[in-house]
Image (spheres, grey):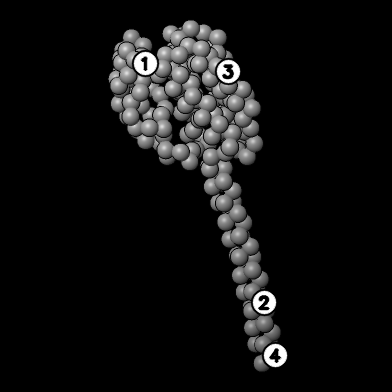
């Protein structure tokens, strides 16, 4: 009888120990999942990148070379100041590369004529889109596309509105384009 009680007590202690360890592991998993979700939510610096990008896009829509130059300079500063802390090592490396190239395009835009600004805007848009794939966004964006830009190879851009306002042609072809996809 004593042996049975001892075995029962040992088994009960083992069960309680395993349950406690299981709860600890569950809390660790929840904390990891929460941290992953925080990483995928939009950081304040990325909101400013999008705001500066949209200012640049709108200046190109208006065919305002001076405003585009100013917006390019602001975007360059914002891109250079963005912190990649909080992302895993692979994401950090990819983001650093994207941000460096995007900042170079923004810098070119800040000191170019409108035609050259639009060429760099096309490449900048790809970089910003790639960045958003990694960092996510809390803002609904519309990837829009004009098939007639760049010798009919086309050009994409991001917008916060569904309405087409073409940054590659401005008033010449304001509504040329289509929404390719919605990004959330």
Of marks 1 and 4, the one in the foreground: 1
Image quadrant for the C terminus?
Answer: top left
Closer mark to the observer between disc 2 and disc 1: 1
- Residue 115 position within the rendered picture, expressed as x and y whole percent measured from the top left: 43, 8
Name which residue lies at 38% across and 32% down: 161
Q: Which residue is mark 1?
A: 170
Answer yes or no: do the residues labelled 1 and 3 have beta carbons within 8 Å?
Answer: no
Could you tell me which quadrant the N terminus lies in? Answer: bottom right
Q: Callout 2: 10 Å neighbours few (<14), some, many (20+)? A: few
N-terminal label among 2 and 1: 2
Q: Position of residue 57 (x, y in %)?
A: 45, 22
Name the residue located 67 percent from the left edge and 82 percent from the top edge: 9
**Which of the two residues, 124 or 73, is positioned nearer the viewer here?**
73
Q: Which residue is mark 3?
A: 73
> Marks 2 and 1: CB-CB under 8 Å?
no
Residue at x 41% of width, y 32% of height:
160
The residue pinned by badge 4 equals 2
Q: Examine the rendered structure and indicate whether residue 71 appears above or below residue 86.
A: above
């Amino acid at each position: 009888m004593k042996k049975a009680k001892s075995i029962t007590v040992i088994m009960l202690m083992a069960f309680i120990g395993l349950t406690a360890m299981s709860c600890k592991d569950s809390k660790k998993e929840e904390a990891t999942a929460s941290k992953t979700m925080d990483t995928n939510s939009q950081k304040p610096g990325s909101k400013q990148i999008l705001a500066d990008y949209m200012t640049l896009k709108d200046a190109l829509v208006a065919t305002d070379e001076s405003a585009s130059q100013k917006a390019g300079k602001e975007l360059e500063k914002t891109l250079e100041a963005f912190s990649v802390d909080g992302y895993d090592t692979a994401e950090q490396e990819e983001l650093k590369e994207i941000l460096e190239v995007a900042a170079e395009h923004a810098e070119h835009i800040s000191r170019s004529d409108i035609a050259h600004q639009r060429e760099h805007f096309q490449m900048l848009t790809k970089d910003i889109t790639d960045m958003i794939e990694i960092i996510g966004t809390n803002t609904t964006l519309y990837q829009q596309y004009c098939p007639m830009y760049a010798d009919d190879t086309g050009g994409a851009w991001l917008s916060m509105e569904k309405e087409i306002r073409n940054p590659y042609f401005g008033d010449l072809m304001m509504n040329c384009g289509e929404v390719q996809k919605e990004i959330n």
